[in-house]
Amino acid sequence: PRTEGKVEQIVTIRVEAYAWNCPNHITPRFSQREVSEALAPVHERLARLEEENAVLRAELAARP
């Protein structure tokens, strides 16, 4: 969107090189199996909490 503001300063950056494969900036990759194994406890806890939530909702619904 256009504004009525006035440009007061500008910074120009000249990039001479960029290393896509720089080891300091490589995003770790994991296999589907590794992710599934790491998330298994989370999924198990979620299932237990959902069951507990269903029981509590049923108890609340049964109250007069």
Image (cartoon, grey):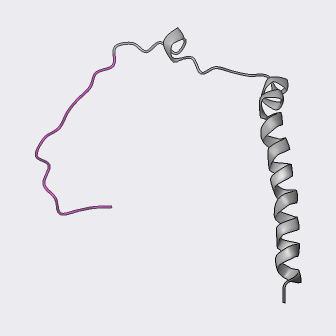
Q: Is residue 22 visible?
A: no
Residue 55 percent across, percent down from the top left? 88, 66
Name the residue at 10% across, 46% down: 8
Left or right? Give the position of 55 relative to 39. right
Name the residue at 84% across, 59% down: 52
Residue 15 percent across, percent down from the top left? 33, 19
The boundaries of the magenta stretch are: 1-15
The quadrant holding residue 35 is: top right
Classify 18 as above or below 12. Answer: above
Q: Nearer the viewer, residue 12 or 44?
A: 44
Q: Nearer the viewer, residue 7 or 28?
A: 28
Left or right? Give the position of 64 relative to 2. right
Q: Nearer the viewer, residue 44 or 11?
A: 44
Q: Is residue 11 magenta?
A: yes
Q: Main SS type for the magenta part?
A: loop
Question: From the image, which quarter does the N terminus lie in?
Answer: bottom left
Question: Residue lying furthest front in this view?
Answer: 64
Disc tally is 0
The quadrant holding residue 21 is: top right
Q: Is residue 7 magenta?
A: yes
